[in-house]
Image (spheres, helix red, strand yellow):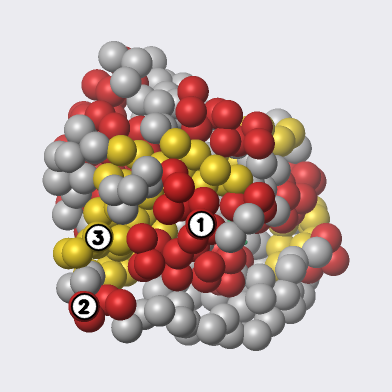
């Protein structure tokens, strides 16, 4: 069986030499465990943080050990009551051909209901992040004007569409290419812009068409957050979901220089971790399944083939090569 190990910790942008593809024996199953042949794995921005030797809400990856992350696969052998061979399961030991998983830590998924990849994206933690960030963290209300950054990505494209379904007044998205901007308009965003085309603040003001914004769903941080603070209306709310513009910088970024505006505008800026909203996972999955079925929400996916290409897929995702969720197909 092959696995991708962390060979060295990246400084700044990760590179191929930080990863190592290694052949390892498949361990003997213990009672309660299942052997899973992985078919799909997720690459996510938060993994960049785990490559640093720094304390965070998830422990760092260990050097010379396999990376971890969301994956789907087929049970090939089971010593657990929970799953039988040929079951399709979701678990958190990606980055390897075969995973040995505690049966209780693998969740059976119904691929008759939706394709397996959806459980890594729209129907999984990605979707929960978008929905919980909007409704539970930003306190979204009908009629709110919403701005989403990283809007053509996995979380962002869902956050914008969910805002529309829930009755947003205006939904604005930003992304890094003209093709992505076009896609956002197809997905039902009212306005979209390419942040490479000019200062975010000016483009956001124009997209808001004189009405400002009430909610900012922040995937990016940095200049985007500063621009949003300027354009937010009184009592505006920010769901601080991610700050991808900072994940590969070697120097800490400057805080938004206009943060003091939060006082006069009585803004709320609130960070969150999707896992803290797991108690809503069932409610969310029901809502999302309905929106997908009714064609009210759709999700994009970008596939890369081969475990050996997973590090590249991860780096390319951080650079914007993906539209929607970036997924690696194994075997
Ligand atoms: P995406 O699918 O959005 O992929 C990352 C995207 O980030 C790229 O496609 C790229 O698109 C964009 N990007 C990269 N660098 C920059 C930059 N400097 N400025 C603006 N955009 C940039 O990933 P996810 O949907 O999985 O994650 C999106 C965000 O949500 C991340 O910040 C992530 O950390 C966060 N997150 C947080 C969770 C939580 O629990 N709080 C859970 C899941 C995700 P482009 O071409 O537009 O530049």
> Residue 275 is drawn in which quadrant?
bottom left
| Proximity of marks 3 and 1: CB atoms separated by less than 8 Å | no
> For the residue labelled by badge 2, is the local secondary structure a helix, a strand or a loop?
helix
Q: Position of residue 88 (x, y in %)?
A: 45, 29
Mark 2 Cα within 10 Å, few/some/many (few <14, many 20+)? Answer: few
Which residue corresponds to mark 1?
202
Q: Position of 247 compared to 214: left or right?
A: right
Q: Residue at x 25, y 54 (%)?
A: 214
> For the residue labelled by badge 3, is the local secondary structure a helix, a strand or a loop?
strand
User: How far apart in space, not on screen, are marks 3 and 1 (Cα)?
Assistant: 16 Å
Q: Quadrant of the C terminus?
A: top right
Classify 318 as above or below 115: below
Which residue corresponds to mark 3?
233
Q: Position of residue 271 (x, y in %)?
A: 32, 69
| In the image, the residue with mark 1 has its CB under 8 Å from the nearest atom of ligand 1 | no
Mark 3 Cα within 10 Å, few/some/many (few <14, many 20+)? Answer: some
Q: Position of 80 compared to 307: left or right?
A: left
Q: Position of 153 compared to 21: left or right?
A: left
| Proximity of marks 2 and 3: CB atoms separated by less than 8 Å | no
User: How far apart in space, not on screen, are marks 2 and 3 (Cα)?
Assistant: 10 Å
Which residue corresponds to mark 2?
264
Classify 287 as above or below 221: above
Q: Position of residue 58 (x, y in %)?
A: 44, 71
Classify 240 as above or below 130: below
């Amino acid at each position: 069986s092959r696995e991708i190990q962390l060979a060295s910790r990246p400084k700044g942008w990760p590179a191929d030499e930080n990863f190592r593809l290694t052949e390892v024996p498949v361990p003997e199953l213990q009672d309660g465990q299942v052997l899973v042949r992985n078919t799909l794995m997720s690459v996510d921005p938060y993994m960049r943080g785990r490559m640093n030797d720094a304390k965070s809400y998830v422990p760092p990856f260990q050097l010379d050990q396999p990376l971890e992350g969301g994956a789907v696969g087929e049970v090939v052998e089971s010593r657990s009551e929970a799953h039988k061979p040929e079951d399709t399961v979701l678990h958190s030991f990606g980055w390897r051909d075969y995973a040995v998983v505690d049966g209780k830590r693998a969740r059976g998924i119904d691929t008759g209901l939706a394709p397996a990849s959806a459980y890594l994206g729209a129907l999984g933690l990605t979707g929960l992040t978008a929905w919980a960030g909007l409704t539970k963290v930003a306190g979204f209300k009908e009629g709110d004007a919403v701005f989403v950054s990283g809007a053509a990505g996995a979380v962002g494209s869902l956050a914008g569409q969910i805002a529309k379904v829930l009755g947003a007044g205006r939904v604005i998205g930003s992304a890094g290419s003209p093709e992505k901007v076009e896609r956002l308009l197809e997905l039902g965003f009212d306005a979209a812009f390419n942040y490479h085309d000019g200062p975010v603040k000016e483009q956001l003001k124009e997209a808001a068409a004189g009405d400002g914004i009430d909610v900012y769903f922040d995937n990016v941080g940095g200049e985007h957050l500063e621009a949003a603070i300027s354009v937010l209306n009184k009592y505006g709310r920010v769901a601080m979901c991610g700050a991808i513009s900072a994940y590969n910088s070697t120097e800490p970024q400057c805080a938004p220089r206009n943060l003091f505006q939060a006082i006069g505008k009585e803004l709320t800026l609130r960070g969150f971790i999707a896992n803290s909203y797991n108690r809503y996972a069932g409610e969310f999955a029901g809502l999302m399944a309905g929106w997908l079925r009714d064609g009210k929400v759709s999700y994009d996916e970008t596939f890369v083939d081969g475990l050996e290409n997973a590090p590249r897929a991860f780096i390319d995702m951080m650079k914007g090569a993906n539209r929607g969720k970036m997924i690696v197909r194994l075997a």
